[in-house]
Amino acid sequence: MGKVKVGVDYNADADGVITPIRIHWSDGRAWDIDRVLHTCRSPDRSFEGIRYTVLISGTEKYLYLARNSWYVNAAM
């Protein structure tokens, strides 16, 4: 799957912990993130950066933050 860059609205707390709250697709569509379920880094380097497992309209999706850019896999 290819990476697709997306825009993300997020909150950052005083400790620098980032919580994504909304994803913006390049064609203007947007999805609210209901909840962040999990965050992790890849121990085997199968992806770069931080992977957020998020809940959007009852469906789990992956959202990635790498080098100050957000992306999803093309099948979102």
Image: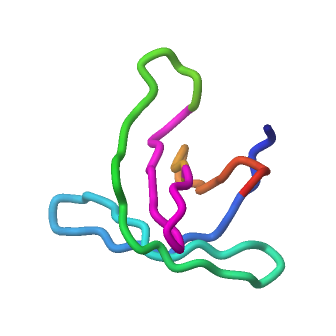
**Residue 9 coordinates in the image, percent (x, y):** 49, 76
* Label total for image: 0
Give the residue furthest to the left.
Answer: 14
What residue is rendered at 49% in x and 15% in y? 44
**Residue 15 coordinates in the image, percent (x, y):** 16, 59
Report whether 46 appears left or right of 13. Answer: right
Which image quadrant: the C terminus?
A: bottom right
**Residue 25 coordinates in the image, percent (x, y):** 73, 73
Classify 39 as above or below 60.
above
Give the residue furthest to the top.
Answer: 44
Report whether 49 appears left or right of 1. Answer: left
The boundaries of the magenta stretch are 48-62
Which image quadrant: the N terminus?
A: top right
Q: How is the image coloured?
A: rainbow
**Residue 6 coordinates in the image, percent (x, y):** 68, 64
What residue is rendered at 49% in x and 68% in y? 58
Magenta highlight on residue 11: no
